[in-house]
Image (cartoon, coloured by chain):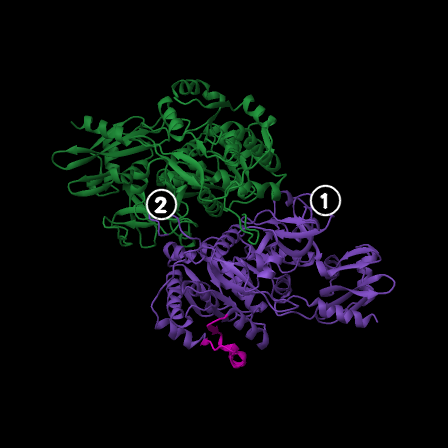
Chain colours: A purple, B green
Amino acid sequence: MADSSHAWAAMTPTAFLDRAAAAHGSRIAVVDGEQRWNYTEFRDRCRRLAGGLRAVAAGRPVAVLAPNTHVALEAHYGVPWAGVPLVALNTRLGTRELTYILEHSDAGVLVYDPSYAEIVGEVRAALKTPLVAIDAGSAYEDLLAGAEPVQEEVADERSLLAVNYTSGTTGRPKGVMYHHRGAYLQALAMANQFALSPHTVHLWTLPMFHCNGWCFTWAVTAAGGTHVCLPKVEPSEIWRLIQEEGVTSLNGAPAVLDLIAHFEGASPLSRQVSVGTGGAPPAPAVLRRTTRLGFDVTHLYGLTESFGPALVCEPVPEWQDLAEETVVRLKARQGVGNLVSLPPRVVDGHGGDVPADGATVGEIALRGNNVMLGYLRDEAATRGAIPDGWFRTGDLAVRHPDGYVEIRDRSKDVIISGGENIASVEVEHVLAEHPAVLEAAVVGAADTRWGEIPVAFVQLAPGASATAEELVDHVKARLARYKAPRLVVFGPLPKTSTGKTQKFLLRARAAEEHL
Amino acid sequence: MADSSHAWAAMTPTAFLDRAAAAHGSRIAVVDGEQRWNYTEFRDRCRRLAGGLRAVAAGRPVAVLAPNTHVALEAHYGVPWAGVPLVALNTRLGTRELTYILEHSDAGVLVYDPSYAEIVGEVRAALKTPLVAIDAGSAYEDLLAGAEPVQEEVADERSLLAVNYTSGTTGRPKGVMYHHRGAYLQALAMANQFALSPHTVHLWTLPMFHCNGWCFTWAVTAAGGTHVCLPKVEPSEIWRLIQEEGVTSLNGAPAVLDLIAHFEGASPLSRQVSVGTGGAPPAPAVLRRTTRLGFDVTHLYGLTESFGPALVCEPVPEWQDLAEETVVRLKARQGVGNLVSLPPRVVDGHGGDVPADGATVGEIALRGNNVMLGYLRDEAATRGAIPDGWFRTGDLAVRHPDGYVEIRDRSKDVIISGGENIASVEVEHVLAEHPAVLEAAVVGAADTRWGEIPVAFVQLAPGASATAEELVDHVKARLARYKAPRLVVFGPLPKTSTGKTQKFLLRARAAEEHL
């Protein structure tokens, strides 16, 4: 930037707020309950936040523990503008994990929603190095009111923008380092994929602490759209906001879509709402239900390490005349690289590409500017994850003849029974199509005769009933018989803090049940 | 790229063809008359072109002289993949200009459409340094057939991608240097602005030699859409392609839109077609006519130096309920910075920002990654154009209270009469609204009493008639009286090779007429 004979600029996603304030200053930027701010006000608040934080952070990262409120959103601009990285904390974590993350990231400030005052007290008592804690209520407003508006310029677009911790079902969470360049480009890819524009009204059903809300925290602003905050995923509130605020887009895991579609007050939408879904492949039943209500659902695939969705199951004109059942199957695939990703690879054990035959399984490998800088203070893990410029996802998939990638299973979830591979996700989808089933998870249990057998854990829909035998017959009628569960266990599924089913717990239970 | 512990990649717009081939390999990429190629074939052809060119270019730039054919399009990938810059030549230039540009750019190869064989012969005879000339017919196909497919990797994203020569009504054309990074980001901005997607069918009504087709040569590919070539702007052919190929978007100067809207076979579209227009502000009459037919027109503003459209008159929800006459006026403004531009400035003589009052005139200044590297072999001109990191456009404008920029006049086209500034464009728009007027240009003529007086040059619509007095009264009824032309001259308007009205010629004629 110092060279005055060139007009270029470092890429940073916070620049999108400068653009929105200049181009769309009087448009509503943020709706949070009864409060609303336009883009001029939103930018001013974020610049004051930067001024206030710069004085107290002393160069250390700023962590935020908040649901999807305007405070969580403002942190995505105010913290980088203070010249320090943002650490958006998963609100479902416990004292131990939060303490670990705050220490590991060396956070100097913690901005917290008042509803987390108790756990914050416990965490502060446990921390070895003290930090400045700021209540997101009046203390936060006082900080803004008393601060000078500032915004630090980004000199190096590959410098640290944010640290997002993986949920890690095993071992310690890892701090995934985001750079400005990657977040900027990922935001552009998301804006393009969902045709975000000044007409966009985006509902925050996806936690902003997941990959910075898949970079929609910046993408919606880039487009000059409106952010509608949603502190709690509550179907009646979601439907109210869709109608009253004129929501045009939202994101969420398939379980969230299911919740929306199953709400008793659900009714066909008067206009289409774009939906990005990810975290798990959407079951055909979920796709069907939401599509019929008027949601235009696109399946996305990515990881914390890839700034969220690196793959998009891009809908194409060739699908328009296909039968609904075919389309939902095609749309449940992980898809193709997004606009800014290099084409993803599916590699075999020797690093070569598997054939695009829809059958040969390999590991998804990603490369591009929307791949992390690395893991914070863990060079060995970084080298392990990116051994040769390609990030290894750990997810096993096939490539179809049309180029679309489809996960056959998370590597550890392949069930090998009688020498045959069973993709648990395939059986789960079929179970979820049964009208009585709300959600299903399938894992393997060791078996002396077959090696492993598939065991299903099923949560029935409220008020519905089905026997194990009925469900097994349902699967047998649709898939190879060896894929049918040998055992069905009813009850709610255990979840991680990020909403993923804890299969390792189910595996332990399956082993007990099959003794 | 050499550092194996990072997964990032150099940004280059040619990467979009890799993406399209991987994600949308079997979709039709290019339609050119009876010929069509899918994305797998398109990429293969471009890689063979690269292989063939690499052998003959010997590191020197490759120039292309062709209308909007598949050859012109393929050059946008094949030439950079050969590791050398592309020089897309304006097909309307004469022997002298073409010779100058080929020598100034040091082009080693000239690929030319057979229809330009004669002028190419003259140019070759005039050139001091010989070059390899390749006929875009069979010689070109032979080159591809005999070549190995290759693609050079881009090491430095700020290296030279293309050189686009300004049309320069005065002086020598200047070679505007494009870098990979800028074209990549500009393509993303255009893809976003027009919501390009795999459903896009883009008709090439804009010459690809204008800022590489405003970077749509790469943007349409990025989205996995279809390019429909159009070697000649012919209304009947445009309407045929819109209907038969299912065109969803096109670009062009207001004069092209006018041509399309005035075609006798014009009829309301069965589906909306997105249109980007630029080069001159669209007259309200043109906007009205095209909008009523179903075209969704967005006004764009930019220069060769800014990779084409740096500003977009972004339509916003707030305009939806306004009267048509208000909307066409709002839409004729130059607008706001595009998604990847820094917010444009309007600066006064001291480099300060003018107030957003819709009245104070300043010069539009641009900054961002979509500003040129500089002028080829002309450091003095580069420093003059970018004195402080901000590119000075030479265009005078106001900023409205809503942040939108509107050109009051190209600096040299301000008419100062009796101490009052007259924006010639304002008078031109009003004249164009008269039903008998096809096109109008207004310039100043020196006058002893008033300093200058406005003189109008008017081309009437075919079969229409109007007197000078009628037109003057028409203006007086709508604008301040001092803005009305004192003299009206009827006849066709002289144009530059790029379709811009040659006002310097009109000024000379106005001076003669007003003697």
Q: Position of residue B430 (x, y in %)?
A: 29, 39
Callout 2 amino acid: Gln
- Indicate whether A96 appears above or below A209: below
Image height of B72 relative to A315, above or below = above
User: Residue drawn 83% across and 70% down?
Assistant: A514
Q: Is residue B124 magenta?
A: no
Magenta residues, as a range?
A106-134
Residue at image coords 34%, 53%: B403
Quadrant where the image shows the C terminus of chain A: bottom right
Q: Residue B137 in the image: x percent, y percent? A: 54, 22
For this orientation, the residue located farthest to the left is B449
**Residue located beneath label 2 in the image:** B334
- In this view of the protein, which residue sits in the foreground, A61 or B96? A61
Q: Is residue A113 rendered magenta in the image?
A: yes
Q: Which residue in the structure is indicated by mark 1?
A: A357
**Where does residue A455 sit, x and y in percent of width and height?**
79, 65
